[in-house]
C-alpha cells in the first residue's frame, strides 16, 4: 500500500518540487518531528489523564463520539498520501490545519490540567512541525493561494471529568492524525525509496 502510494505519479510541478533538495531537507525535519510527537503521546496521556476508563488504545474510544461533540472537539482534516486525486497542496493544507487544530485544543485544555509539563512540550513539537509544513506550503503555493484561516477553539469543560475526556480524545485524535501525517510525508520522501522497497520485498 505504501509503495503503491509512493509510486503514484505526481503532477509535473509537484513532482519537481518534491525532488528539490531543499524541500527534501524540510521533509526530513518534518518526519523526525512527527515521530517525536507520536513517541511522546503515550507519556503525555499518562501524565494528564488519570481515569482508568480512558485508555489511549481502546475499542471504547469510538463510544465517546457524542462526548466529543458535546465538548466541542472538531474532527481532524482528512489526510491521504499524495496522488493524482489528492494534491501536494491539499495534503500540506490538511497537515497545517490539523496541526493548528490540535495545538488549539491542547491550548484550551492545558490551563485546566493539574500536570501540564508534557502537554506543553507536545504543543511545542506540534508548533515546530507546523513551521516546517508552512515552509513546504510556501514552496508549493502559487501566487493566488488562499492564506490559511486561524480558527480559535472553544471547548465546553464544566468539570474535571470533561477536562479529562477532552485531553484523552484530543490525544487519541492527534495520534491517528499524526500517523496519517507520517504516512503522507513518507510517500513524499525520496531519500529512502530503495531501502523501503528492499524491506517490503
Image: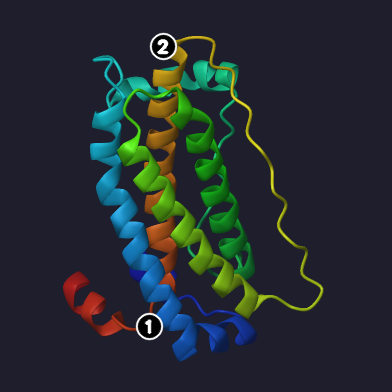
- The residue tagged 1 is 190
Give the residue drawn at x 53%, y 57%. 95
Few, some or many residues within 10 Å of mark 1 (<14, 14–19, 20+): some
| Vertical arrangement, residue 132 with respect to residue 143, above or below | above
Q: Position of residue 65 (x, y in %)?
A: 50, 21
**For numbered disc 1, what is the local secondary structure?**
loop
Is 126 placed left or right of 91 in the picture? left
Asked whether residue 78 appears in the rendered view, the answer is no
The N terminus, quarter of image? bottom left
- The residue tagged 2 is 161
Q: Nearer the viewer, residue 17 or 38?
A: 38
Few, some or many residues within 10 Å of mark 2 (<14, 14–19, 20+): few
Q: Earlier in the sequence, mark 1 or mark 2?
A: 2
| Vertical arrangement, residue 10 with respect to residue 36, above or below | below
The C terminus, quarter of image? bottom left
Q: Position of residue 119 (x, y in %)?
A: 37, 39
Amino acid at each position: 500500500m505504501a509503495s503503491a502510494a509512493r509510486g503514484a505519479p505526481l503532477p509535473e510541478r509537484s513532482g519537481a518540487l518534491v525532488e528539490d533538495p531543499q524541500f527534501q531537507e524540510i521533509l526530513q525535519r518534518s518526519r523526525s518531528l512527527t515521530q517525536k510527537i507520536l513517541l511522546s503521546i503515550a507519556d503525555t496521556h499518562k501524565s494528564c489523564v488519570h481515569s482508568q476508563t480512558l485508555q489511549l488504545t481502546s475499542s471504547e474510544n469510538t463510544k465517546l463520539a457524542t462526548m466529543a461533540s458535546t465538548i466541542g472537539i472538531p474532527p481532524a482534516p482528512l489526510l491521504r498520501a499524495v496522488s493524482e486525486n489528492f494534491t501536494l497542496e491539499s495534503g500540506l493544507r490538511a497537515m497545517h490545519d490539523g496541526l493548528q487544530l490540535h495545538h488549539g485544543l491542547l491550548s484550551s485544555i492545558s490551563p485546566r490540567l493539574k500536570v501540564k509539563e508534557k502537554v506543553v512540550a507536545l504543543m511545542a513539537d506540534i508548533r515546530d512541525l507546523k513551521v516546517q509544513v508552512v515552509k513546504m506550503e510556501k514552496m508549493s503555493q502559487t501566487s493566488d493561494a488562499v492564506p490559511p484561516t486561524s480558527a480559535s477553539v472553544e471547548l465546553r469543560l464544566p468539570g474535571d471529568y470533561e477536562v479529562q475526556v477532552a485531553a484523552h480524545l484530543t490525544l487519541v485524535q492527534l495520534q491517528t492524525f499524526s500517523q496519517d501525517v507520517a504516512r503522507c510525508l513518507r510517500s513524499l520522501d525520496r531519500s529512502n525509496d530503495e531501502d523501503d522497497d528492499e524491506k517490503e520485498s
